[in-house]
Amino acid sequence: MDIDGGRQVYLPRCNGDVDDDGRERRTGTVWTATAHIITAVIGSGVLSLAWAMAQLGWVAGPLSLVLFAAVTFYTCGLLADCYRVGDPVSGKRNYTYTEAVQFYLGGWHVWFCGFCQYVNMFGTSIGYTITASISAAAVKKSNCFHWHGHKTNCDQLLTPYIIAFGAVQVIFCQAPNFHKLSWLSAVAAVMSFSYATIAVGLSLAQTISGPTGKTSLTGTEVGVDLNSSQKVWMTFQALGNVAFAYSYAIILIEIQDTVASPPGENKTMRQATVMGISVTTAFYMLCGCLGYSAFGNTAKGNILTGFGFYEPYWLVDFANVCIVVHLVGGFQVFCQPLFAAVEGKAARRYPSLARDRAVLFRLVSRTAFVGLVTLLALLMPFFNSILGFLGSVAFWPLTVFFPVEMYIRQRQIPRFSTKWAALQSLSFVCFVVTLAACAASILGVRDSLKTYTPFKTKM
């Protein structure tokens, strides 16, 4: 917000092909915003929920899904109000999450926010590359099992699939901006519905027809499935996986910046958040609970690639193809804001670069980014540990801490008042969960590295 003699100064509304800020007119609706949310939320996280349920059990598992959904919905509502300063229709825009933090909080918060946000976007790109490659390899593995028998050694080397996914992303990354990819996000949302529905259907069929795995109120049993220390760490890693399944606040403001106004973008985003979180939570409950019911405490880390399902092989193949297509779009949803930040900063520092060599700079920088992501995916192909780490890194600072702090500053809530204490308590509890999940996931990566050979990982 600009201040002139203590008065709020707003940018004027415009007619024609530009918005009130002089940029290309935004045309997004509640439906396109919901599609972006579903694309970002129902990603690789949904595939790990049966495993997470197995670690948590019938009580803590569903409860954790509900609690994470409620916290995400509430804090995303707070964050949506921070897109514009002052008036929700004509106030000055904050184009990115970091700009909102800079306006409301400033100081060290800006550096910390940028670090968490862009590290998580980068890490999510790695996670999506790993997951898409595992699913692509699973297609060939499924066909092998079908034609040669379930006892055949059909292990697939992941390296060529990771490289192929990176090559595809080099092409899609050349799209100038996030607004040009609405069609890809819509396709990806359809794909996410498809494979989540297939996972639910296969799990339900397995539960009905049997055999099913052993389940319990508390999940995996100490002394039977694992020891007591492993139980503690696996529980926290499972919470990290659940947190990852809801980590979309990181790009909420970027999604909101695609929405047309009036009505106020915050109202549109609240509606989109209600629909997006409701749909995803319903799918999560079905995927997690039915997957746990089908496979019990031995549920695999990835329900569609762990080969609890062999038949019908063509349906398993189709589900994994849907995952790959969805993650092609999901990769872009997370990476385009990162590209925009890097290229915007480069343009401000080197104006001639943006004017004369913008296309060349985009080609070189984005290709280099995808190359680095691909290399790191080749070096760290650990599904559940990586998801748990990414979820823990993003959840507390970006989904809880900054929205709460900005809301307190925006509404000028008195320190030590009842509402202030309630908000800070929420933030502290989420911080403790985040810290524990992060430690557990790092431990999981460490354990995986003990038996790992670079570029030789098979699934």
Image: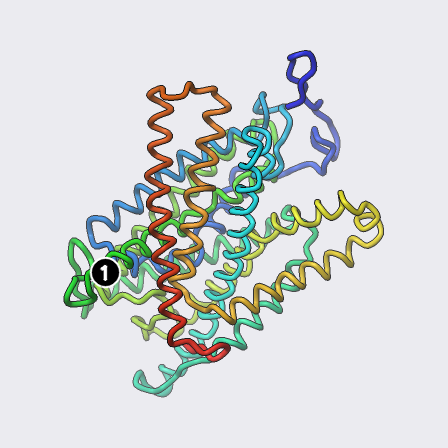
**In the image: residue 361, left or right of residue 263:** right
Picture residue at 70% right of the left edge, 32% below the top: 19
| Of 318 and 242, the residue lying toward us | 242
From the image, which quarter does the C terminus lie in?
A: bottom left
* Residue type at numbered disc 1: Ser
Q: Quadrant of residue 357?
A: bottom right
Picture residue at 55% right of the left edge, 28% below the top: 104
Q: Position of residue 110 (x, y in %)?
A: 57, 38
**In the image: residue 28, left or right of residue 140:** right
Picture residue at 46% right of the left edge, 30% below the top: 405
Q: Position of residue 446 (x, y in %)?
A: 39, 66
Question: Which residue was labeled with disc 1?
Answer: 229
Q: Position of residue 150 (x, y in %)?
A: 31, 83
Q: Position of residue 69 (x, y in %)?
A: 36, 42
Eyeballing the image, is 284 above or below 268? below
Q: How many marks?
A: 1
Q: Quadrant of residue 401?
A: top left
Picture residue at 48% right of the left edge, 66% below the top: 130
Q: Quadrant of residue 83?
A: top right
> Could you tell me which secondary element the residue under label 1 belongs to?
helix
